[in-house]
Image (cartoon, rainbow, N blue to C red):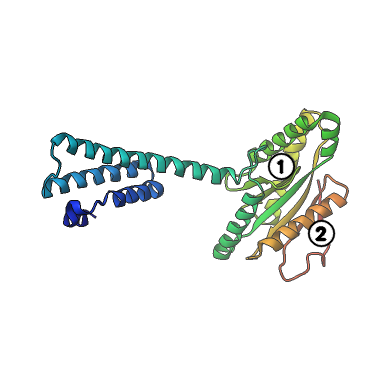
Amino acid sequence: MIIADYVTSYELNLTALYLLLTLLVSWFCGLWWGLVFAALSMFSQIEVSGLIGSVYSQRFYYYVANANNAFSYLIVALLTAGFRALYIREQSLARVDYLTRTGNMQAFYERIEVETARQRRDGKPFAVAVMDCDYFKLINNDLGHHEGDHVLQVIAATIRANIRKTDMVARIGGDRFAVVFLHMPEFEALQAVKKLRKEVDAAMDRNSWPTTLSVGLAIFPGPEGDVNRIGSFCDKLITQAKAAGRNKVVHRVYDPGEDSTSQPPRLAAK
């Protein structure tokens, strides 16, 4: 760029290319690198103008021209880095449930895709627990939707406080949550779910809320690769848990080679 600027002299103004490079650096590398590149661009143009000689009739105009360029580079770096920060923030918020501050449906399915890809590499199992709030409509009808929102927030906070940092909780429906357990075989997943239900029951009792959790727990021991089939399998388990009388845990180990309805689900003891 500097060589091209020197060779073309004042016959071709390359300021737009300097601005473009400053924009790209600010977008991909952040504000500080953008400012560094803006300063380097300004320094390069000053050096080139010193080598080829000034064409301005007065020194004052030379300083004004360089000040305009410096201002342009600074504005481009600041605005680009600001827009980049907003873009990243909006991308993050698009995966967050506004009420409970957990993940949403999109974040849940993206995490499943990540886990299936990871599982193809290391072969370690993962588990998915889908949790449906029993008697939640009673709270909305009797106590109002504001209280219902509070119930969901408490449940989400309780789940988040009782899972590992490597696990993920998402709200995937009105009163339905899902937890993705990393590196979790069947027995450990059952123990984790029992702990969650115990903690949620205690939180509900403290607030005199009638809500309990029906849970469909799916264990995925090997590479599956089909996110839609995994989601469908989890949906069937939570439906079976609700049909079993609510406040129950139904669990199955997923086998992609069989029909998920060909074997009866197992009902875990409370």
Quarter containing the N terminus = bottom left
- Residue 102 in view here: yes
Vertical order, 115 against 25 (above or below)? below
What residue do we see at 37% from left, 46% from top?
A: 26
- Residue 183 in view here: no
In the rendered structure, the answer to whether residue 155 lies left or right of residue 19 reads right
Q: CA distance from mark 1 to mark 2?
A: 20 Å
Most foreground residue, 235 or 140: 140
Q: Position of residue 223 (x, y in %)?
A: 62, 65
The residue pinned by badge 2 equals 265
Q: Give SS at disc 1.
A: helix
Q: How many marks?
A: 2
What residue do we see at 73% from left, 50% from top?
A: 130
Counting residues from the start of the chain, the first of labels 1 and 2 encountered is 1
In the rendered structure, the answer to whether residue 11 lies left or right of residue 241 reads left
Give, as a three-letter code, the residue at label 2: Pro
Q: Position of residue 57 (x, y in %)?
A: 13, 39
Give, as a three-letter code, the residue at label 1: Leu
Quarter containing the C terminus = top right
The residue pinned by badge 1 equals 196
